[in-house]
Amino acid sequence: MKKRVVLGFSGGVDSSTAAALLKEAGYEVLCLYLETGSGEEAAARASAKALGLPLRVCDARADMEKYVCAPFAAAYCRGETPSPCVMCNPSVKLRLLLECADELGAEHIATGHYARAEGGALYMGREPNDQSYMLCRILPEQLRRLVLPLGGYEKGEVRALAASLGLPSAKKGDSMELCFVPDGDFAAWIERRGGAPCPGPLIYNGRVVGEHRGIHRYTLGQRRGLGFAAGRRVFVSEIDPQANSVTLSDGEGLFTRSVEAFGARYLAEELPPSPFRCLARIRHSRSAAPALCSVSEGGRLSLLFDSEQRAPTPGQAAAVYLPSGQLAAGAIIGHGA
């Protein structure tokens, strides 16, 4: 008897190729399209039809608003830079996949993430497409039932495989970064919701040199769109929500070896005695770097990197890996990191 799996399905090249690989591996594949505001249901239906697979549609917009959109907007208004996919995967995507799987009697759930799920553990995928960072705060019970068919592939290989299989998504572009903000302008999206921070002082070299447009429009290390010409390259070095100020610098203060993260979720059954050597990633776009991790009560992780890291940003996730590449924990970087 075939094992059933419920696959998160957008109709893009990743989920379509994942579906084909699952079928080839002998699974009975049930596709679940989550409507989050991207409006890609028609494409998902066309791709599922081309694969000969059943598709169920779930309106996830209320869940997105509660667990992702509202917290995302609130974090930016606090001067933080949240990771929406890190927020969404445990609280919306994988949770709804599991609910559907339980309803249909499916043993497994699956997604098209580029990471490896093996023996109840999660590992890095292949560079440069590794997406394990986006899964760093999922729940152990979600991980135990998760199948990741693309874990051993690179993006180019997946596109080539999709083309060889004649999948209509083979030449489709990558999915948007923020599915709930189709135009990509998240600052304007926050402003349309109401309650966005007001303009305030823009500070450089200890003096007010202008007015920023609202702290939700800035993130640490930002260089473009600052509204100030210093005659040299300047960067956002501090965002103070209490003072409603944004401070610029020539780059000093952006680098540090120490990062504090909170609310850790642990995905490894056992951690080495604290402190332990690890690899850590503090932004999806960065490679994991060697560090020493100390674990404190209450889910606090203190990371001391071997080399300086640029602009660890409150609200971003910190993903901690064992030297084997296994994801051990995911926490959220706090202020004063």
Image: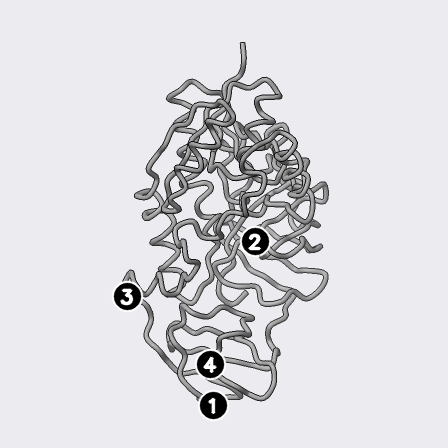
Image quarter of the N terminus: top right
Kindly identify the residue that appears in the image at 53 percent across and 88 percent down.
205
Q: Please state which of the two labelled residues, at mark 3 or mark 2, is closer to the viewer.
A: 3
Q: Secondary structure at mark 4?
A: loop
Q: CA distance from mark 4 to mark 2?
A: 30 Å
Asked whether disc 1 touches disc 3, contact meaning CB atoms under 8 Å apart, the reply is no
The residue pinned by badge 4 equals 227
Q: CA distance from mark 1 to mark 3?
A: 27 Å
First of labels 2, 1 by sequence position: 1
The residue pinned by badge 1 equals 207
First of labels 4, 2 by sequence position: 4
Q: Secondary structure at mark 1?
A: strand
Image quarter of the C terminus: bottom right
**Residue 14 picture quarter:** top right
Q: Position of residue 187 (x, y in %)?
A: 39, 65
User: Viewer-proximal residue, 100 or 168?
Assistant: 168
Kindly identify the residue that appears in the image at 51 percent across and 57 percent down.
316
